[in-house]
Image (cartoon, rainbow, N blue to C red):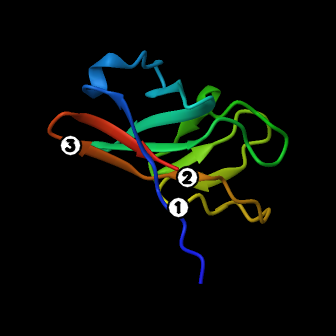
Amino acid sequence: MFESVKQWHKIGEAETVFQWQANQMCVIEVAGKKITLARHQEGLYAFAYKCPHASGIMADGFVDALGQVVCPLHRYRFNIKNGRNTSGEGYYLKTYPLEQRADGIYISF
């Protein structure tokens, strides 16, 4: 059976190094990939740069009170933790694991 190997990449020393927008989201580039970061209820989350439906830039959307990230184009909603579509269209938003370690914040893919 094939097991995928996760590679961890350090993305910053702390949350304060990122250029957060008013909606508590930002875009970073890691290993040639654009990733959206979001802060919500004391948590830090990472997910795809673009919506899987019509390629809306997810960082231009918002996170609602239920922890759903909302695409700015058609208001499709996705669970910020697992990427499941919560508005019923059947799409899936890629999410990435994050770890806050003593020496910084890391992302895996």
Q: Position of residue 65 (x, y in %)?
A: 44, 47
Give the residue number, with chain letter if any, for mark 1: 82
Q: In the rendering, which numbered label is found on residue 95? A: 2
* Callout 1 crowding tier (Cα within 10 Å): few <14, some 14–19, many ≥20: some
User: Disc 3 and disc 2: Cα gap in Å?
Assistant: 19 Å
Q: Is residue 86 above or below residue 38?
A: below
In the rendered structure, are the residues bearing label 2 and label 1 in contact, judged by CB atoms less than 8 Å apart? Answer: yes
Q: Position of residue 101 (x, y in %)?
A: 20, 43
Q: Position of residue 91 (x, y in %)?
A: 76, 60
Q: Which residue extends farthest front?
A: 1
Tell me the element at label 1: loop
Q: Is 38 on the left-hand or right-hand side of 74? A: left
Give the residue number, with chain letter if any, for mark 3: 101
Q: Quadrant of the N terminus?
A: bottom right
Q: Which residue extends farthest bottom?
A: 1
User: Disc 1 and disc 3: Cα gap in Å?
Assistant: 21 Å
Residue drawn at (32%, 17%), measured in percent from left and top?
Answer: 17
User: Disc 2 and disc 1: Cα gap in Å?
Assistant: 6 Å
Type of amino acid at the residue the image marks with label 1:
Asn
